[in-house]
Amino acid sequence: MTAASLPILPLAGVRVVELCSTASGPFSTMLLSDMGADVIKIEPPAGDGLRQWPPLNQGYSENFASLNRNKRSAVLDLKNADDLATARRLILQADVLVENNRPGVMDRLGLGYAAMSAERPDLLFCSISAYGQSGPRAGEGGFDLTIQAAAGVMSVTGEPDGDPVKCGVPLSDFASGLYAAFSIAAMLAHVRAGGRGAHIDIPMFGCTLGVAALQTSEYFGNDRSPVKLGSAHPRNAPYQAFRAQDGHFAIAAGNHKLWLDVLGVVDLPGLAQDPRFVTTTDRARNQAALRDILEGVFTTRPVAHWIDAFHVAGVPHARINDYAAALDDPQTLHMGWVQPVQLPDGQTTRTFTSPVRLNGHGFPIRRRPPALGEHTEALRGPDVWGAR
């Protein structure tokens, strides 16, 4: 393999200490570790709570494995003076600290940003919390469900007449992790250029509002809160899931040409002149009537027929996949995103790796997810990081 064909690890040499549990923090540091950062995960004696989440593979959580590859684990009891001193030393030797405790916890431990940056001015100290480090709600805790509720996601998710439901994917957790990793990578460039470190404040509430840009702008534009539309879109139609003879599928006619292509597939060219459907705005306003007309045609044939027809017509389309189907999709297989990973007990499972490619290469799994405290003793030594 030539040097040009080797995978690029842009964060190689970056040292990260993680004091996090569950999802948002561990996800952010895994993104960093995928790109080459050396991540030491400090866990309490009972371990990250995610280690107990099923499914369990010979007692080891597959959920935990999915967020903690390429890391080392040290068990430190921060109520113990010696362990607290070890944690402090590791942080001061690191480039980045990521923590997702409630505001004030790190300060009470003597590990807060003010104390650490006084000795290490270029330290990047990233705090992920429910509502942020200041303000009237800063002291509140939160999990993905409560943040989705508070930030409006549950008000636009589900069918119009249905009860409140959350997004099935933990949107608030993972959006916050993405914001954290992006902010850290941006600030690493700043520090490498000679700038000082910083306290990066990642509020899950704000991050969830941030990724809802289309919903917040809709409110700012018409002074009305968006509402639940099921799979439909407030400004485009046909742009939703439709019933076929044997199931459902989705199409997204996101512009006028695609709308005309849809009419060609269903052989209803006259709808182009129907005053209810002339413009995108008209179609969105009357999309319930449009859905009924289209489903009258779609329900005469199976899903496979319409998938083939819209593929030929060039209209964006998709089956309603479950995760088994999505992970077995030909594109997933081509990209090599599903890879085997070994667990600490020697069992092998599978995991979804980084979807990012650089120069055509993905990122390797350099280190399997760790057993609880697997590296504790080695990390008590004076030189745990090695050469940069």
Image (cartoon, rainbow, N blue to C red):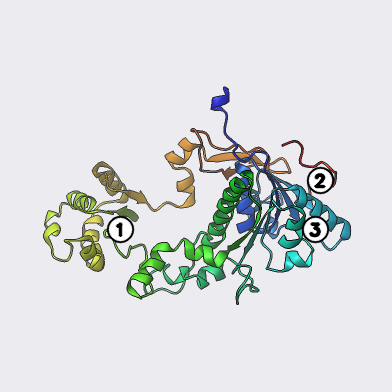
Mark 1 residue type? Tyr
What whole-number distance in Å separates the C-alpha atoms at marks 2 and 3? 15 Å
Q: Can residue 43 be seen in this view?
A: yes
- Residue at the farthest front position: 194
Residue 45, disc? 3
Q: On the image, numbered disc 2 is attached to which residue?
A: 379
In the picture, measured across the screen, residue 307 lies left or right of residue 110, that is left
Q: Earlier in the sequence, mark 1 or mark 3?
A: 3
Residue 1 position, x and y percent, is 58, 22
Q: How crowded is mark 1: few (under 14 residues within 10 Å), some or many (20 or more)?
A: many
Image coords of residue 258 (percent x, y): 23, 50
Instruction: Check disc 3 and give the amino acid type.
Output: Pro
From the viewer's perspective, is the residue at label 2 or at label 3 nearer?
2
Q: Mark 2 touching mark 3, by CB under 8 A?
A: no
Q: How far apart are marks 1 and 2 (CA)?
A: 53 Å
Location of mark 1 (residue): 239
Specify the amino acid type for callout 2: Leu
Q: Residue 269 carries which label?
A: none
Residue furthest out toward the right: 82
**Residue at the location (28% across, 43% down)?**
311
- The residue closer to the viewer here, 54 or 356, is 356
Pick the front one: 302 or 293: 293
Marks 1/3: CA–CA distance? 50 Å
Residue 227 at x, y percent in the picture: 37, 72
